[in-house]
Amino acid sequence: MSEESGSDFLVFDRVTKRFGALTAVNDVSLSVKKGEFFSLLGPSGCGKTTLLRMLGGFERPDSGRIYLEGRDITDLPPNQRRVHTVFQNYALFPTMTIWDNIAFSLKLAKKPKGEIDEMVDSILEMIQMSDQAWKYPSQLSGGQKQRVAIARALVDRPQVLLLDEPLAALDLKLRQHMLLELDTIHDQVGITFIYVTHDQGEAMSLSDRIAVINRGRVEQLDGPAKIYEAPQSRFVASFIGDTNFLTGEIVSIDGDYCRIEVEGFPCVSAFNDKNLQVGQRVDLSVRPEKIRVTLNPPLPEKGAGINVFPSKVKDIVYQGVYTKYWLKSGNLQISALKPHSRFLLDQEPITWNDDVFVWWHPDDGYMVEEGAET
């Protein structure tokens, strides 16, 4: 992870890009710090790849400017920007060895042979592929090809490395391994990484900060923990992980907490961090792992001030690390996760159609104003 920097290294200033009637990027302003691992996260078609292509020089914004270390690069062609891209399909030259693939841009820049040798050998050692240097791309695994593509993009030390869904073609286990490798490479080279993905797990595990993009706009720009625990809109809450939404109207306020009347459900207590007033409608987001499911209600000393509701178990999925429950409470369906931190075969199990209690602390719900999803 990068250290905080006082100045903005990369800036998008009110950037808009249209393709015919479609506005792919809509008046986006954001800044990235030097050395940061920064992710653009959102569903397909949200505009994140268009932002990346404008930064790389492959698209030009219809309005707005892009600055890199204080220099306006908006109108510069790709070859005049020290910004390199790693693509999902690797884009390696099939008739060149791994060594020659990595050396290609250095030879194009007419670097001295001794300097090329030193730079290529050094980065091959960094990606732990020195013994593969004279192989061809067809002789490598998907993970090895991706490491070579990253090495080729990094060998002449660009100011920014752009990664456009770089792990999408890999299987799950290889993706998980490459996430660790990417994090290590970033720490070693210290270059600013801009990472585009629709996979919230990838973004959460790698990033210093994440910009969540929806319909061409930045919905939230924060660190991973804040985006998950304190989403600024219904879209962010639902896109980042699973959540339950309880929609209703604030009917009373008691200090830092409020009561929300939810249709077809009992009143719910929540921490009123946004200082909303009686009569305002809200969406309360409660993550499944915050909700406890038990056959008996919590003990009185634990239950004071806690939201406790009777429910019926409608479905159960055992997934090893945790069990997921779907429960009917009032007119609502609620999901809850029970982690398996201990293995207790003698504990009375919760089964289908059991009458149970669901409960969570008012601090464990997070309010967004109703309709905050755009």
Image (cartoon, helix red, strand yellow):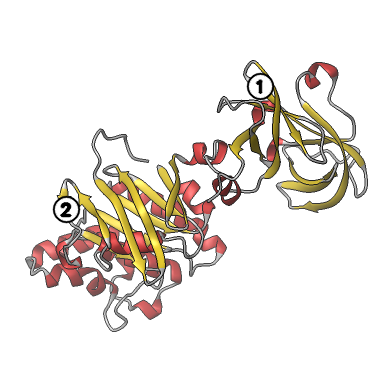
Q: Nearer the viewer, residue 238 or 78?
A: 238
Q: CA distance from mark 1 to mark 2?
A: 48 Å
In the rendered structure, the answer to whether residue 261 lies left or right of residue 173 reads right
The residue at the far front in this view is: 279
In the rendered structure, the answer to whether residue 357 lies left or right of residue 35 reads right
Question: Which residue is located at x 17 percent, y 67 percent?
Answer: 79
Asked if the residue under mark 2 is in contact with the one under mark 1, i.e. CB atoms within 8 Å, the reply is: no
Amino acid type for the residue under numbered disc 2:
Asp
- Residue 373 percent location from the top left of the image: 56, 48
Q: Is residue 324 above or below residue 155?
A: above
Q: Is residue 254 above or below residue 48?
A: above
Question: Which residue is located at x 64 percent, y 15 percent?
Answer: 255
Amino acid type for the residue under numbered disc 1:
Tyr
Total marks in image = 2
**Image quadrant in which the N terminus is located:** top left
Q: Earlier in the sequence, mark 1 or mark 2?
A: 2
Secondary structure beneath label 2: strand
Q: Nearer the viewer, residue 77 or 325?
A: 77
Where on the picture, by quarter, is residue 172?
A: bottom right
Question: Is residue 129 among what the camera can see?
Answer: no
Where on the picture, by quarter, is residue 367?
A: top right
Secondary structure beneath label 1: strand
Residue bearing the label numbered 1: 257
Q: Is residue 85 above or below residue 160?
A: below
Q: Which mark is residue 49?
A: none
Question: Which residue is located at x 66 percent, y 45 percent?
Answer: 243
Q: Is residue 94 above or below residue 78?
A: below
Question: Which residue is located at x 59 percent, y 45 percent?
Answer: 371
Question: Is residue 62 among what the camera can see?
Answer: yes
Q: Which mark is residue 72?
A: 2
- Residue 28 percent location from the top left of the image: 35, 51
Where on the picture, by quarter, is residue 55?
A: bottom left
